[in-house]
Amino acid sequence: MIGIVDYGAGNLRSVQKAFESFGCETAVSADRRALDRCSRLVLPGVGSFGAGIAALRESGLAAYLSERVADTPLLGICLGMQFLLSESEEDGVHAGLGLVAGRVVPFTEGKIPHMGWNAVTDLRSPLFSGIAEGTHFYFVHGFYADAAEDAAIAKTEYHRPFVSAVCAGNAYGVQFHPEKSGEAGLKLLRNFTRI
């Protein structure tokens, strides 16, 4: 079962529908007992880093996820990926979960937010198994991960190269929205269920 973490923000239903489209059982919950029954966890996210990480901490889910990731694969999506990092500069400086070394920083060039389809390259993870180099995924974000090179498992170019997917141990994150990225996005989510 896939546990989709509900901390009061995030595109929960679209992520749930994406997993259910290929037969995955899901549980959308903030209840740790319900999430304990799940073999994989997904942390979606939309909105601002400061408000989102505060909600995760106040609910106790930040501490819960930091414990569970020791033996359970966790996938952060968009803002959910950014939560995995050490800190963010959005709306002031805020500490993240610290599961992936790096900092969330703003774009300073081009139209912001970066929105639309863009190529994902330098694929270096089973998360991208069967997905061709340069496949396009759907992005909506004004901040990006300045992550450690050894944590980068994919990159994208938007006026400058940036890390668009990360991994450290059981913590995986993608800056794009696989649930809005057609067949390639569904393939990535299927891959996550097999890691």
Image: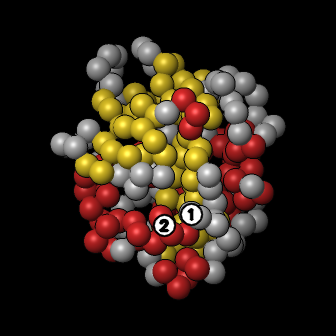
Could you say where residue 51 lies in the image, as x and y percent from the top left?
25, 56
Q: Label 1, label 2: how many angstroms apart (C-alpha)?
A: 6 Å
Give the left or right position of residue 84, taking residue 41 as reference.
left
- The answer to which of 140 and 143 lies nearer the viewer is 143
As drawn, the residue found furthest toward the left would be: 92
Number of marks: 2
Q: Is residue 81 visible?
A: no
Residue at image coords 25%, 41%: 90
Discs 1, 2 touching: Cβ within 8 Å: yes
Q: Is residue 66 above or below residue 133?
A: below
Q: Amino acid at mark 2?
A: Leu
Q: Under tag 1, what secondary structure? A: loop
Could you say where residue 140 lies in the image, as x and y percent from the top left?
42, 36
Give the left or right position of residue 159, taking residue 21 as reference.
left
Q: Is residue 90 above or below residue 19?
A: above
Specify the quadrant that holds the C terminus: bottom right
Number of residues whose C-alpha sits closer than 10 Å to that of mark 2, classed few (under 14), some (14–19) or many (20 or more)? many
Q: Is residue 112 visible?
A: yes
Q: Is residue 113 above or below residue 111?
A: below
- The answer to which of 151 and 165 lies nearer the viewer is 151
Number of residues whose C-alpha sits closer than 10 Å to that of mark 1, classed few (under 14), some (14–19) or many (20 or more)? some
Q: Which mark is residue 65?
A: 2
Give the left or right position of residue 52, taking residue 145 as reference.
left
- The answer to which of 139 and 1 lies nearer the viewer is 1
Q: Which mark is residue 69?
A: 1
Residue at image coords 58%, 34%: 150
Residue at image coords 62%, 35%: 153
Residue at image coords 61%, 27%: 120
